[in-house]
Image (cartoon, grey):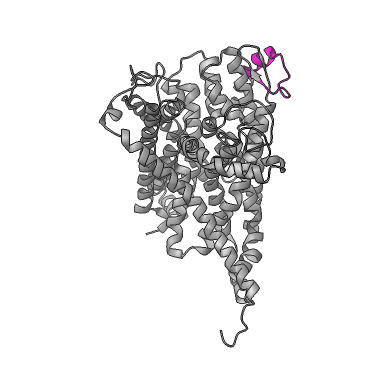
Amino acid sequence: MAAIAVFLISEAIPALRANQANFFTELTWNPNSEKSFGIAALAFGTVLSSALALLIATPIAVGVALFISHYAPRRLAAPLGYLVDLLAAVPSVVYGLWGVTFLVPLLRTPSQWLNETFGWFPLFGGEGIIGGKTMIAGAVVLAIMILPIIAAIAREVFLQAPRMNEEAALALGATRWEMIRMAVLPFGRPGIVSAAMLGLGRAMGETIAVALIFPATFDITIQILTPHANSIAANIANGFGEANDIGRGALIASGLVLFVITLLVNMAARMVINRRKEHARAGA
Amino acid sequence: MTTIQHISTSRRIKDRVVQGLVYLAFLLAVVPLVSVLWLVISNGLGRFDLEFLTHSMNGIGARDAGGGAYHAIIGTLEQVLLAGVISVPIGLLTAIYLVEYGNKGRLSRAISFFVDVMTGIPSVVAGLFVFAFWILFLGLDFSGWAGALALSILMMPTVVRSAEEMLRLVPNDLREASYALGVAKWRTIVKVVLPTAFTGIITGVMLAVARVAGETAPLLMTVFFTNSINTDPFSGPQMGLPLFVFDQAARPNDTAVDRAWTGALTLILIVMLLNLVARLIARWRSPARGR
């Protein structure tokens, strides 16, 4: 871990020295020709796309976890859980290919409708081209990719919910939903939070799928239906081939930023999970 | 139900609505899986022929049909194998330390925390690290070996986690019986604990391999591109199957996109096969069921 940080820093320094612009506020990325680059637009795109992905994936993942832990017939629960796990086994480059050829055209019409009907809402606003390789298309693909991770952890937590409390709730005449709301969800809430954070970390680091989908623009906009999107990881994958020495150093510097962000998110998530484990053990 | 008071309609409706939502969520999760698999199979089968499996892209022009992924398949198999050779012994030893020697001390808790955090390292960062260390710092060439190094960084935490879990499932009675017979600790581990957990560990390793085989980003920075066959992972650029898909998908011609789909199909077949074999081994002899 330390070695990763050390080598990334040491290789990033020459490029950062040569940088003509402020690394943290500059939007554009021209390290090869003009020696000026900044992380601002990329970091913004990374955070926005992962946050959107999380917003889409978490409710569905919680639903899936509940389905497998409490709704599905006992006999079917394990195979169905395996089916969801299969989602995680599909390589990310395949999701990228699927996103570009299938999802992007599919989302065009709904995007245009959303833009016309709810254009006053900043997220859905924007003039000119609507649809295509947009932020929302990338976010949907990211959501599909992090869904199995969140669902798997949430499922574990839901299965650990004390049986006694569930049965007590049912015995008092609660419906299944009331039982889940009273006995399962309060117990599982920290687990859901940390699962979502792990998913967030994964979404931020995801590279190839978004590299294929995002149109690699360098601006900050929250109009997720217009073709303006990029992320740190996608930029590394797209820019690496044609980068010269300074360019590579610049990409390494951006990788360092990504590393630090994901590290913080993951450590926070792990801390929540570990604390919860100790709790559970103390309570048992 | 006649003697007990009925559940009020509003509560019943709410219950039904939530049930519907939960079912819907599950359907929503399965739809993309089916769609991805369907598209990959229907688009990939067209070029899934002997030529694709036995020819490289050497000398295939930008718009030509034909060509194949032989060089990429070889590259992927070699890189993944090398990654396994690096990460399995290290991961296994770490897991043995954590379970048998660590005693939940400060060091073992720190190790297990960092293993958890390492699981979250983005694959691009692993690739960049190997690039910075191996190619920029040591001044060595792009090679399959460098790619294997990057993959092993991603693989190691998965191997440690799964091996640790399997070792923990080995009943303590077995260890104590062995100690009672006067067997030394290392012999107990080698002769009793490891064989008992063996199938479980294999499963974990296979799953880790399957995960790593689909990684593209780290290869991009360490293996680089080539269109010709290079069977030597220690010298010169190689190709990888995910990289092949990425490369072909980014080209504008239909022939290239067709190749990308077929590459994706091959990749999914390899990954699913590994997954399936792993699950079968797990089901065939799992120590958890305690026979």
| B133, above or below B86, in the image | above
Q: Is residue A22 magenta?
A: yes
Does any portion of residue B109 appear in the rendered image? Answer: no
Q: Residue at x 63, y 15 (%)?
A: A31
> Left or right: A250 with respect to B140?
right
A202 or B51, which is in the foreground?
A: B51
Q: Is residue A235 left or right of residue B268?
A: right
Residue B53, how many percent across, how many down? 29, 30
As drawn, the residue found furthest toward the left would be B50
Q: Is residue A128 magenta?
A: no
Q: Quadrant of residue A27?
A: top right
Number of numbered tags placed on the structure image = 0
Point out the residue furthest to the bottom here.
B3
Q: Can you say whether B285 is above or below A119 in the image?
A: below
**Residue A135 image point, x, y percent:** 61, 36
B70 or A182: nearer the viewer? B70
- In percent of width and height, residue B66 lies at 31, 25
- Report the quarter where the C terminus of chain B lies: bottom left
Q: Position of residue A284 (x, y in %)?
A: 62, 62
Decide: is A236 above or below B43. above
Residue lying at 61% horizontally and 70% vertically, measured from the top left: B13
The structure residue drawn at horizontal position 36% and vertical position 34%, both measured from the top left corner, is B262
The quarter of the image holding the N terminus of chain B is bottom right
Question: Seen in the image, is B229 located left or right of residue A194?
Answer: left
Q: Which residues are magenta?
A: A10-28
Residue B11 appears in view: yes
Q: Nearer the viewer, residue B195 or A79?
A: A79
